[in-house]
Image: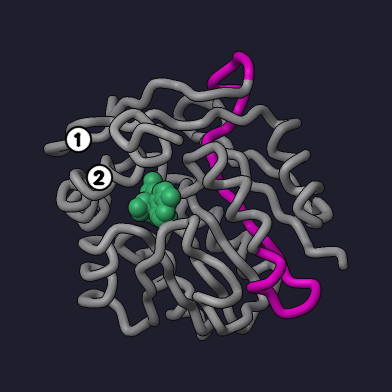
Amino acid sequence: MKDKQTDPEQLILESWQINAKPWIEVLNEGGIPSRKLVTNQAIINAVLETGPETVLDIGCGEGWLVRALTETGISATGVDGVAELIQSAEEQTEGRFIQLTYDEISAATITERFDAIVCNFSLLGGDSVEQLFRELPGLLNGRGYLIVQTLHPDNFPGPEGWREGTWAGIYGDFSQPAPWYYRTLSSWLSLFTRSGFELISQTAPLHPESGLPASLILVGRYSV
Ligand SMILES: C[S@@+](CC[C@H](N)C(=O)[O-])C[C@H]1O[C@@H](n2cnc3c(N)ncnc32)[C@H](O)[C@@H]1O
């Protein structure tokens, strides 16, 4: 049995509960430059390229991506485990939001089916993400799409495993950074394949100032 106080999966959720307020503030202020410069538009484009009518945003936070997709005419739903983030999303957005942790997400707890699922910098855990991926096919319409944006593995060389978290580079009243589970490119690809997703594209948008990859975007399609 895992100790709740040291289980990294629990620490991730706790950290987002503690930091929901500064996170909402920093996003409202557009306070993360790489997002404004590169990664926000990159994930919107990646979703639009799959041509969905309905999208589920997993780990939606305060809902900015649901708002952006809704503006393009897509019917978007957000799900997140943190009550304060879901509340803020509901206050700011007309979209639909559900409060569930990843281990609660399944075809039984979310009854709608979607053309695409998007996870924007929200896959932070180890087993919780493995378990979530097993449930994703059941949430899709037939051969639906899975679009993941994450930290680029080349920027964090080393073996797969848990890493210490930090809020360095993000301004605000943040505390208690959570550990995060680092996956190499091949571990991401293997996770997609094991979960039944054929890789459609793999891109690394570049940060215009540093010239380094600002993120990794993987697009998969469920191949039944
Ligand atoms: C870096 S934020 C990204 C939020 C949003 N996708 C965005 O682009 O701004 C990570 C999000 O994942 C959510 N999250 C992480 N692990 C979770 C879990 N196990 N269950 C539910 N939500 C989780 C957090 O609550 C947080 O909102």
Left-right relation of 182 to 49: left
Screen quadrant of the C terminus: bottom right
Residue type of the residue flagged with mark 2: Gly
Q: Residue at x 22, y 31 (%)?
A: 176
Left-right relation of 118 to 20: right
Question: In which image quadrant can residue 164 be found?
Answer: top left
Looking at this view, is 28 or 211 the one in front?
Answer: 28
Seen from this angle, which residue lies furthest left?
Answer: 173
Is residue 187 among what the camera can see? yes
Q: Residue at x 64, y 62 (%)?
A: 135
Q: Which residue is mark 2?
A: 31
Image vertical order of residue 11 relative to residue 91, above or below = above
Q: Residue at x 57, y 68 (%)?
A: 106
Tell me the CA gap for discs 2 and 1: 7 Å
- Does 147 appear in magenta? yes
Q: Which residue is mark 1?
A: 171
Image vertical order of residue 210 relative to residue 135, above or below = above
The reply to whether the C-beta atoms of the residues labelled 2 and 1 are less than 8 Å apart is yes
- Percent position (x, y) of residue 167? 28, 30
Question: In which image quadrant can residue 219 be found?
Answer: bottom right
Q: Considering the numbered disc 2 on the image, is that residue within a helix, a strand or a loop? A: loop
Q: Which residues are magenta?
A: 136-159
- Does 146 appear in magenta? yes
- Percent position (x, y) of residue 86? 29, 67
Q: Residue at x 46, y 76 (%)?
A: 77
Which of the marked residues, 2 or 1, is nearer the chain's N terminus?
Answer: 2
